Image: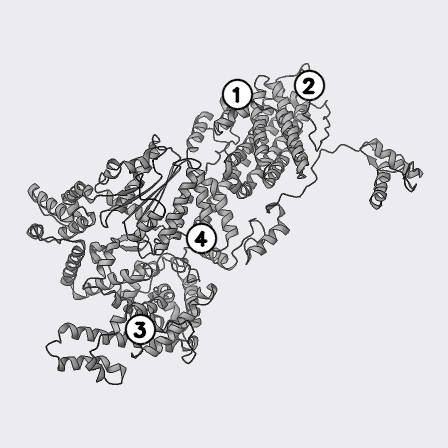
Amino acid sequence: MAQTFGAVPDKGLRDDLGNALTQSVDEFKALLDTNHVWDFEKATSRDVYWDLQAIQFQRQEKRTMMNLGRIQMFLDGMDGLQDALEELEPSKAASIMAYVWGPMRFLLKVTTVNDKAFDEILEVYQRLGLDIPPLEEYKQFFADSLDARRCLLHLYRDVLEFHRLAYKLFSLRTLWTRLHRATWRDLESTFAHLASSIALHAEFIRTHGRRVHHDRLPLLRAVDSGFAAPPPSPPPPRPPPPGSGPGPGPADHDFRRGYQQYEVAYATSWRQFRQREIDRKREQKTRILKWIAAPNKTETLHDSFVRKRGLCPDSGRWLYKRYDAVSNWMREDPPRDSTLWVHGPRGMGKTILASLVVTRLRELIREGRVVPPGAQVGYFYCQEGDQDMATYLGILRSLLHQFVSAADEVMAPDPTDHGDDGDVESNNTSRTKNNNNNNNATILPLCADKITNSGGSSLSSPEAALPLLEAFFDINPRQYLVVDGLDECAAPAEVQQAVAFLEAQVTRCEDVSQGSLRVLFVSAASADVRRVMAKHGVPGEGGREVPLDVKNNAQDIRGYVRKRLEPAELAKANRRFNLTEANVQVIEDQVAVQSEGVFLYAELAMEYLVKQMTKRELLEKVKPGMLPDQLSTMYDTLLGTLKDNLTQLSPEHWAKAKLLLGWLVCAHRPLKWHEIQAILAFDPDHDAVDFDLRMIRTENVSDFLGSLVQVLPGDNIRLIHSTAKRHLVNTEHINDQSVQCDLAILCLRYLSLRCFAAPDYTEAERREHILQGYFSFQDYAASQWYKHIDSVITSCRDVFLLPVPAAVTAAAPSSPSSIYTHHLLLASTSHPATTTTTTIAQHLRRDHYVAAFTSALDRFTSAYDQDLEPSASPPHPDLPLDSIAAYSGLPFYRSLHRLWKHILAHQRRPVEDRNKIGIPRLDAALALHRAAIETTVRPSTAAAVGADTIELYYGPNLYKCHRTLCVFFHRGFDARLDRDAHQARHDRPYRCPLDACDYAPFGFSSNKDKDRHVRNYHAELSDAPSAFLQMSRRVEPAKFRCNMCPKTFTRNINLKGHERSHFGERPYACSSCGKAFARLNDCRRHERIHMRRG
């Protein structure tokens, strides 16, 4: 909530104070609720005093007095302002001042129910009123001087600005109770600036007002701390003294210089404050986004879907034209249903339809006719296999990230900027336009407060996100949420939590305003999703369930096929088929018929067709019966085409493509492109990493992996569709169990390199290896190796264990290492008719994996022997031995059993220990490698050979978090300061809320320690009302002087009591014991002692 009504003098109104003040009032009125305008415009100072009297009486009854006298100086100042205005603008003064008295009444009435809020309102009124001079004493000064009237205008606008900020908060009905503490703290800098600005006006008035009115003495005022009755009506204005001129004459250079200095100081202070606020808000927003720690994948995916729709921008619009439920949900107010579930079969293009809904809603918001301009759209696309994009927390994070990113604070214009022609109307129009923006910035202080009080370096639990999202839902007039792909969530529990929370929020918002929050779920109708939807009453009557018919895609598919066959589109694939209209029609018909409404099939079919080398081959492929008849068959066909094309280049090309596709399918977190390059660069036969010779030298990955993958900005690679993973692992080309074994072996071999395990590894070697890319794969291998071991044990038995006939088992040798050779030889001699080439290949493959896995395990356990659980140590009672017992006859069983014990023991330790790799030597090596990378290279640093850069080997973010369970362990930061601040919140997560505090950079290890610090050192920031402070007063001079000593007194009765002490007079005697006193109050105090004893 930043300043809007700064010092913006208007050339056209400089000679008319009334019009300038009225214009400020009109700007303020435009921000008010219509119900409050009428209340405000009738308000008077008398109403404020009556309200204060009533509040004081109520608090006396409840014994909750709040030192109401703090507001007296502000009331006196505003009474003086009204007195001055009634002489200058007698016809407008009451209506102008009504917008001071009206907001005061509103704020006092609203906040009196909350002691902390009421206390802080009084505190700010005290700060603002502290320096306001008795303006009624300077009425002649204002009448004589145009410059003095401008000062009066500035003061009024500053008061109006405070009321604007406070009204914006406390007019939020029940929401203000949640926002008050954080927002008021966030506004502290604004209140301080307003107080200093008013002090500047007061200084100018006092300094130069006395020059004009040197013959007048200031009127002394006594400030009462109570409100027994409203003040009397002000006396009629005095006529100006005879002979008063229009203002200071040209010769009065001191006055003109003083005014110019004042105007410059005022404009400069506002301009500097505005810039400080812009910088502070920008830093606050950046800090919040870093804490949310949501990857930019959601926005990146949406942009990619929008680009994909760009080929046929009108496709998919049938969704809201043919389905009334969707159209009603988007446009009507109120809608028939605020929650919809749209579902259809996999591959029909539901995600593209979801992105279309998001785009269309944004168009409606910009048009501002059907949907209010302040509405917002949030969205999320679940992605199977990506922990960032397949969990309940991931959904909450992404929505929060979007809302915070959309926050656009309206800042004050530069006080010296009057528009191109000096017309304030242009500034007003600009303000009005900006006020149509969303209200998300109002919630940012609450987010910042949550960071301070929640602990942790990033948003790590749904509980921390829920109250923030609720506030965002409440602050805007309408909110649309589109959540796609619930069927791709990591577990049914994630679906349950997401649907339960969003449905509960819709129900809660419906009680306030029907249709203010609308949620659209888009997914396949899997059993898990349908069960969750049924639990929350989404399917059933009322049209909340919208099943899609794939036939609606028919015309869109035909349009898509025709677009892909246009010469310009074919040229992008480097093809010129010279197709006739008849050819195009045949292809269109065949693809449309074969796809059966599944848009994914049509897309893959066109990718397959346009890769044909000749027109004849293309037309052959679209003859009846030639196109694959199912989506799974189409994946096989595309893989076969990719294999043929790459094999023509060399067998190694196809081998590498299979490796890359397998890694994308089986990795335990999405791999970055530079990590895939690192795997390729690692040569396990020679224990070396060679990016220069082994990395793929291609700019376009899709040229290498075909249409099955999609390359997104930020080094991200994903499969074209979630169905691709399921089909790829079931093809003859990719075996997911074998790939899991390969990745486990790879991680173990890589982490056994000299650079990690050797105690005599030198700094010179490390510097050389950095430039060669040796440590590019360390983030993945160090944090995921144990997961691949787990996958091998639980999911890869078929790789190592073949069903062995009973006769062979009986004759098998005792040595486990030769069981496979024995089985193969026996089968080939005893059963020649049943022994096939396939069986031999299977046995050879299993022998290979047994040997490779045994070697990798032995090297790893040998390298870290001292850091692992001893072999002889008893197993943990909870160790699931059944999972590993099947491998007991294999040569690697002993090493695997030892490593498995170590992994499970590590996983059962506290989270602080689980955030480490669990092998001290490996932990230390990783820390040294990272420290060397941070200090010796930058992303633009040249690598060891050629034109390669460090960014090509390690990615753009070189500063990583040290906690393995944190997403920034591999995502990293591009600046050391950001990383250090992130890690500091891991170690001491609870920060002092006052940034200027010496403890703020260090934080506290517990919330209890932080709260104790705040209570002891920053009591004003605690939730309790502030202690009663003696109110600052205008002190009267002590004019009663003692004739016998230098003491002086403000009251004559005090002087008389003092003089009696000089003469020993004690006229007041105690009625109980007779003891005499010089002062009556001393006697009464003594008598109360007798009363208590009695």
Using the numbered discs, state the Cα–Cα distance from disc 3 to disc 1 in whole angstroms.
83 Å
What x and y, as percent, mark residue 803? 22, 75
10 Å crowding of disc 2: few (<14), some (14-19), many (20+)? few
Q: Are marks 1 and 2 in contact (CB under 8 Å)?
A: no
Q: Where's the C terminus, which quadrant?
A: top right
The amino acid pointed to by label 1 is Asn
* Residue 459: mark: 4
Query: Which amino acid, mark 3?
Result: Asp
Kindly identify which numbered label has been placed on residue 687.
Answer: 3
Please state which amino acid type lies under the numbered disc 4. Answer: Leu
Would you say residue 1088 is visible in this rendering? yes
The residue identified by callout 1 is: 19
Distance between the Cα atoms at labels 4 and 2? 62 Å
Disc 4 to disc 1, C-alpha distance: 51 Å
Q: Between residue 821 and residue 151, name the one nearer to us.
A: 821
Residue 260 shows in the view = no
Instruction: Judge the density around disc 4: few (<14), some (14-19), many (≥20) Cα neighbours within 10 Å.
Output: many
What is the number of the mark on residue 235? 2
